[in-house]
Image (cartoon, rainbow, N blue to C red):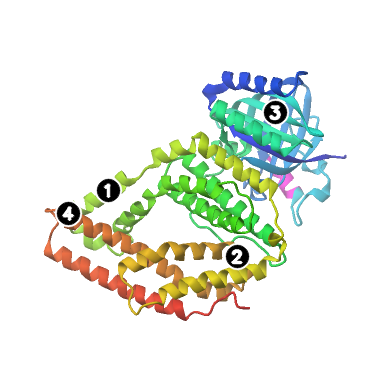
């Protein structure tokens, strides 16, 4: 049986369920402004999603569903794709079926990855959840093609639990991608819509209790290859940073916690580092780096939080000693809670400015503007960049015999930036040599962050009559001196390491 394949390029926007009526009117108005001849359809869609008991389709990043619309049944498999901002790109295959019972053998064999166990998976398929919604669909003319504007209103049902569906999708069908983004801007501004990085299926798995949304707290090396152009390497790094940021933002939205905020901060930091490189290459990034900087200001509280966490962490170096001073320890714990600004961060995430920034980053990743300089192979360029960048770091860290606490703190942002650039291009180099070089510098960065913790403690003890205890002051002094010794050791070790980018 032949199947139909389509490469989706769609922008997904989530709206608050209370905006349902308003959303319907807004979409009608948008469609009418686009075309006087309204091409409108309303469909009732019932979708059942399937996977094996051990979620093997999910492990391959695939989604299998059967959709009932009127008296038609269609089976669809979505294969692994990518999300850029709220822009979703996924290959999708469809076949008509006769009953609500999935059959993977109806798809042609060449769509599956190598070693994909079709028959094993087929034997173990079971229904996990259902989505029922009304789809309002308008077809808008755009350039030589069209844009499908879809408003879905309904719910996800799993294990007796329900969750509302209220989302708008703009799917490009041979039209002009710019039209999608200008429509996206209108929808964000008129309906307080938000860029959606979680599909209905992903939300269904969560509701069914078959997946968890955990923050990514560690950024990994970006998968760039030596034969790629500089453009490919930089846009891939930007895409990775945005994905890391958005995954953590979805975690924040699902359950606001500090780890999600830390993950967002890392993703945003990586995106900004890449944008600054693109700007140096004469790519017009239209103020995106500055706008990212404004979002970063809503995450500056993390530095103090992390300092306090260093002092109170049960597996930390200071916990046992500080526990003896129960009043001080409680004050540190209280301060740690007070410094948290998750509520303000969630508000920021829901703001127009923030959503339009995500929209523009997604637009940049789809357009991928090029310059002549960006056409060069990335390996040689990355080698020169890392050499020049680290030369500066090494000179500053080598400039005196003993560095003061203040000097270390001043050098930390530069060191963190260099380590982050290494995350973008580290895959181009030998892993053992690379990790051997980075390791003492990472220790150094961790140690410098610890200075912040001891500064907070010092300031608390100094400003309080209750804790101004001579023994505590002496203990603190010993801790600061031993930390400086450890930093000196790491610094000397780091300065001796052979650079990994010299092939």
Q: Is residue 409 visible?
A: yes
Is 148 rendered above or below residue 292?
above
Q: Nearer the viewer, mark 2 or mark 1?
A: 2
Q: Residues within 10 Å of mark 1 (few under 14, many from 20)?
A: some
Distance, label 3 to label 2, CA atoms, is 39 Å
Q: Which mark is residue 463?
A: 4
Q: Position of residue 198 (x, y in %)?
A: 59, 40
Which mark is nearer the camera, 1 or 4? 4
Q: CA distance from mark 2 to mark 1?
A: 38 Å
Classify the position of the C terminus by image quarter. bottom right
The spot of residue 71 in percent (x, y) is 78, 22
Q: Earlier in the sequence, mark 1 or mark 4?
A: 1
Expressed as whole percent of the image width and height from the top left, the position of residue 459 reads 22, 57
Mark 1 lies on residue: 335
User: Upstream in the sequence, badge 2 or badge 1?
Assistant: 1
The quadrant in which residue 159 appears is: top right
The mark nearer the N terminus, 1 or 3, is 3
Q: Is residue 243 left or right of residue 487?
A: right
Segment tinted magenta in the rendering: 119-126
Q: Residue at x 51, y 50 (%)?
A: 268
Using a 10 Å C-alpha cutoff, classify the residue at mark 2 as few (fewer than 14 neighbours), some (14 to 19) or many (20 or more): many
Residue 90 in which image quadrant? top right
Q: Residues within 10 Å of mark 3 (few under 14, many from 20)?
A: many
Disc 4 on helix, strand or loop?
Answer: loop
Q: CA distance from mark 4 to mark 2?
A: 46 Å
Secondary structure, mark 2, is helix
Residue 35, position as x, y percentages in the image: 75, 22
The label number, if any, that marks residue 149 in the structure image: 3
* Most foreground residue, 52 or 246: 246
Label 3 to label 4, Cα distance in Å? 60 Å
């Amino acid at each position: 049986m032949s199947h139909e394949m389509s490469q989706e390029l769609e922008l997904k926007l989530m709206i608050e369920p209370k905006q349902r009526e308003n959303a319907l009117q807004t979409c009608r108005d948008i469609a009418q402004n686009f075309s006087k001849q309204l091409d409108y359809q309303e469909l009732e869609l019932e979708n059942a999603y399937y996977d094996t008991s051990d979620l093997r389709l999910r492990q391959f990043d695939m989604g299998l569903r059967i959709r009932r619309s009127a008296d038609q049944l269609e089976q669809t498999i979505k294969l692994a794709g990518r999300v850029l901002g709220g822009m979703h790109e996924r290959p999708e295959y469809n076949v008509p079926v006769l009953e609500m019972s999935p059959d993977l053998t109806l798809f042609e064999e060449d769509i599956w990855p190598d070693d994909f166990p079709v028959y094993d998976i087929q034997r173990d398929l079971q229904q996990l959840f259902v989505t029922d919604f009304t789809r309002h669909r308008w077809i808008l003319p755009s350039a030589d093609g069209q844009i499908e504007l879809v408003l879905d209103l309904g719910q996800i049902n799993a294990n007796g639990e329900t969750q509302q569906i209220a989302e708008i999708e703009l799917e490009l069908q041979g039209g002009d991608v710019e039209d999608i983004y200008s429509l996206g801007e209108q929808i964000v501004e008129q309906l307080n819509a938000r860029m959606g990085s979680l599909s209905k299926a992903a939300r269904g798995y969560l509701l069914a209790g078959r997946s968890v949304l955990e923050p990514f707290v560690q950024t990994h090396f970006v998968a760039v290859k030596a034969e790629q152009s500089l453009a490919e390497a930089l846009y891939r790094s930007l895409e990775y940073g945005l994905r890391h940021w958005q995954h953590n933002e979805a975690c924040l939205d699902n359950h606001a916690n500090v780890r999600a905020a830390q993950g967002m901060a890392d993703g945003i930091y990586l995106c900004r580092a890449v944008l600054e490189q693109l700007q140096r290459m004469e790519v017009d990034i239209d103020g995106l780096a500055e706008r990212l900087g404004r979002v970063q200001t809503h995450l500056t509280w993390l530095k103090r939080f992390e300092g306090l966490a260093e002092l109170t962490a049960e597996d930390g170096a200071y916990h046992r000693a500080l526990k003896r001073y129960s009043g001080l320890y409680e004050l540190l714990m209280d301060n740690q809670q007070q410094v948290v600004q998750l509520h303000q961060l969630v508000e920021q995430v829901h703001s127009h400015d923030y959503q339009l920034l995500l929209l523009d980053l997604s637009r940049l990743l789809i357009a991928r503007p090029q310059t002549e300089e960006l056409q060069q192979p990335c390996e040689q360029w990355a080698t020169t960049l890392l050499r020049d960048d680290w030369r500066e770091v090494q000179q500053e860290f080598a400039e005196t015999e003993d560095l003061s606490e203040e000097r270390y703190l001043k050098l930390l942002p530069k060191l963190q930036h260099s380590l982050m650039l290494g995350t973008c291009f580290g895959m181009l180099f030998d892993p053992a040599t690379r990790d051997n070089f980075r390791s003492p510098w990472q220790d150094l960065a961790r140690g410098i962050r610890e200075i912040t913790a001891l500064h907070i403690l010092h300031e608390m003890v100094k400003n309080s009559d209750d804790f101004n205890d001579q023994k505590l002051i002496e203990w603190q002094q010993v801790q600061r001196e031993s930390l400086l010794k450890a930093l000196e050791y790491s610094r000397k070790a780091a300065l001796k390491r052979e650079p990994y980018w010299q092939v």
